[in-house]
Image (spheres, rainbow, N blue to C red):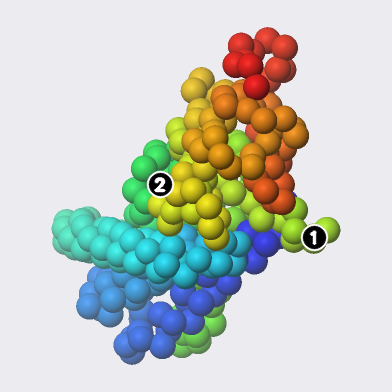
């Protein structure tokens, strides 16, 4: 388990909950049926802040690039805010039509609200990463977190007007569920060991993982070529290709142009060492590989 990632995402959830409490108006902050404007504001602010912090906080901690942090923050917050607020409007309309014709228990309606909210927020991360797989992975963490935390908040914190505790508990549970799902369901990643307790982990989630000094890269360095190397995936097999021949790069201490990666391979970039891991790793002997 990567404890740094847990810390980053749980702090993101707690900060999102605290900041939302600061701007949330009076009344039940999550009631879109009886208090629509307040509920919609709370939904948008919390989900926007959570999406922005969860996407941008690892960047500033591991890569220390303020420009990339701001870009990630703006894009993720915008998506999290707009998608979940739109989802809140859709849910309020549907719930209003349903309750006008059918008697629905309040607890059942709240259950479906927390479920719907987790789907909307998970969809935000799917949009940001351009991956349905990421959406499903995130939803598997956020759905139980929102349902459990939401039910507990409705039953105790909100009932007794402990709004700050409800926001912190909901944010902390959302962060923990998110981090747990990503760690348990991860498939391929790069680890950079900074100390015996601190490991920087970069998840390889899409069909391409680009490293270089540009802010658009998945892994950004402080200096060097804009695009240094790219890891591509096809049929569960990852290959790494050098994009700059002048850079000091090695795979298992050997120079390369194009190479198939297997679990445990080390990628050396200058003095930095990244270890490739994959749950889909296969034996190098049965794979065609270009000459190093």
Give x and y (percent) for residue 162: 50, 86
Q: Residues within 10 Å of mark 1 (few under 14, many from 20)?
A: few
Q: Quadrant of residue 96?
A: bottom left
Residue furthest toward the front? 246
State the residue at coordinates (36%, 79%). Answer: 29
Q: Which of labels 2 and 1 is toward the front? A: 1
Choose between 249 and 204: the one closer to the eye: 249
Q: Residues within 10 Å of mark 2 (few under 14, many from 20)?
A: some
State the quadrant of the C terminus: top right
Q: CA distance from mark 2 to mark 1?
A: 29 Å
Give x and y (percent) for residue 122: 41, 52
Q: Is residue 265 left or right of residue 35?
A: right
Which residue corresponds to mark 2? 129
Q: SS for tag 2? A: helix
Disc 2, disc 1: CB below 8 Å? no
Is residue 100 visible in the rendered image? The answer is yes
Marker disc for residue 16: none
Q: Is residue 198 above or below residue 272?
A: below
State the residue at coordinates (18%, 60%). Answer: 93
State the residue at coordinates (66%, 55%). Answer: 200
Q: SS for tag 1? A: loop
State the residue at coordinates (50%, 30%). Answer: 232
Give x and y (percent) for residue 198: 74, 61
Which residue corresponds to mark 1? 195
Q: Is residue 47 above or below residue 266?
A: below
Q: Is residue 198 left or right of residue 91?
A: right
Which is nearer the N-term, disc 2 or disc 1? Answer: 2
Residue furthest toward the right? 196
Q: Is residue 177 left or right of residue 108?
A: right
Q: Is residue 181 above or below residue 281?
A: below
Give x and y (percent) for residue 255: 67, 30
Choose between 166 and 55: the one closer to the eye: 55
């Amino acid at each position: 388990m990567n404890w740094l990632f847990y810390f980053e995402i749980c702090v993101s959830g707690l900060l999102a909950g605290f900041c939302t409490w600061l701007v949330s108006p009076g009344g039940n902050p999550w009631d879109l049926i009886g208090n629509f404007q307040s509920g919609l504001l709370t939904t948008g602010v919390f989900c926007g802040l959570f999406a922005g912090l969860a996407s941008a906080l690892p960047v500033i901690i591991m890569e220390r690039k303020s420009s990339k942090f701001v870009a990630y923050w703006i894009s993720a917050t915008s998506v999290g805010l707009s998608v979940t607020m739109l989802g809140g409007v859709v849910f309020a309309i549907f719930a209003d039509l349903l309750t006008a014709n059918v008697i629905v228990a309040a607890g059942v309606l709240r259950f479906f609200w927390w479920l719907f909210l987790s789907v909307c927020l998970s969809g935000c991360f799917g949009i940001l990463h351009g991956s349905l797989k990421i959406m499903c992975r995130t939803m598997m963490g956020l759905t139980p977190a929102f349902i459990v935390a939401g039910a507990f908040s409705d039953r105790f914190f909100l009932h007794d007007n402990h709004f700050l505790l409800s926001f912190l508990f909901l944010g902390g549970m959302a962060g923990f569920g998110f981090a747990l799902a990503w760690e348990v369901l991860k498939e391929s990643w790069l680890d950079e060991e900074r100390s015996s307790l601190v490991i920087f982990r970069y998840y390889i989630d899409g069909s391409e993982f680009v490293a270089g000094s540009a802010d658009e890269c998945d892994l950004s360095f402080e200096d060097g070529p804009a695009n240094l190397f790219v890891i591509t995936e096809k049929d569960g097999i990852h290959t790494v290709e050098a994009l700059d021949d002048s850079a000091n790069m090695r795979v298992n201490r050997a120079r390369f142009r194009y190479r198939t990666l297997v679990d445990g391979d080390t990628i050396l970039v200058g003095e930095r060492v990244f270890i490739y891991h994959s749950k889909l790793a296969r034996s190098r002997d049965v794979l065609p590989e270009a000459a190093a």
